Image (cartoon, grey):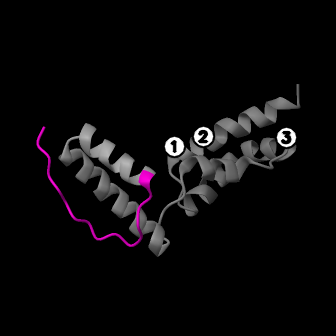
Amino acid sequence: MTKFSVELPISKKPTDLELKKLKEYFKEMPVSEIITGLKFAKSRWHAKDTGTLKVGRKSIVQKEVHSVTTEQAQWRLKNWKMMISNYRRRGYSYPTISRIKKILIQKSKKKSK
């Protein structure tokens, strides 16, 4: 294994634990993989910084079904075509809408048994 030294301009001084992790990553992983990961991290950080980072699908589904009662779930399922158009207008993908429907079906059956 060849040792190289690299100087990095960093905004704040890393802790000993952070330095240890960096050394570990560079020791175990190929540089090309580290660069790919850093590229992804930079893109994500930039999107987060500008406020354009999209919320994950799981949190969207939870937001839609969190406080839905049995009656509300049944009504939404009866009027599903209208609900689909509302969800599409909000920009939800069909897989996300499908997950919402799956949970609504579970909620509608829960207390009606």
Tag 3 secondary structure: helix
34 relative to 29, above or below: below
- Which amino acid type is marked by label 3? Thr
Q: Which residue is mark 3?
A: 70
How far separated are the C-alphas under marks 2 and 1?
A: 6 Å
Instruction: Name the quadrant containing residue 85.
Output: bottom right
Tell me if residue 94 is in the magenta stretch.
no
In magenta, the rendered stretch is: 1-16
53 relative to 63, above or below: below
Looking at the rendered image, the quarter that the N terminus falls into is top left
Q: Picture coordinates of residue 67 (x, y %)?
A: 80, 50
5 relative to 103, above or below: below
Q: Which residue is mark 2?
A: 99
Q: Picture coordinates of residue 111 (x, y %)?
A: 88, 31
Residue in view at x 28 percent, y 71 percent: 9
How far separated are the C-alphas under marks 1 and 3?
A: 23 Å
Dot 2 crowding, Cα within 10 Å, few <14, some 14–19, many 20+: some
- Which amino acid type is marked by label 1? Pro
Residue furthest to the top in view is 113
Residue in view at x 11 percent, y 42 percent: 2
- The foreground one among 101 and 9 is 9
- Which amino acid type is marked by label 2? Arg
Pointer 1 with pointer 3, Cβ within 8 A = no
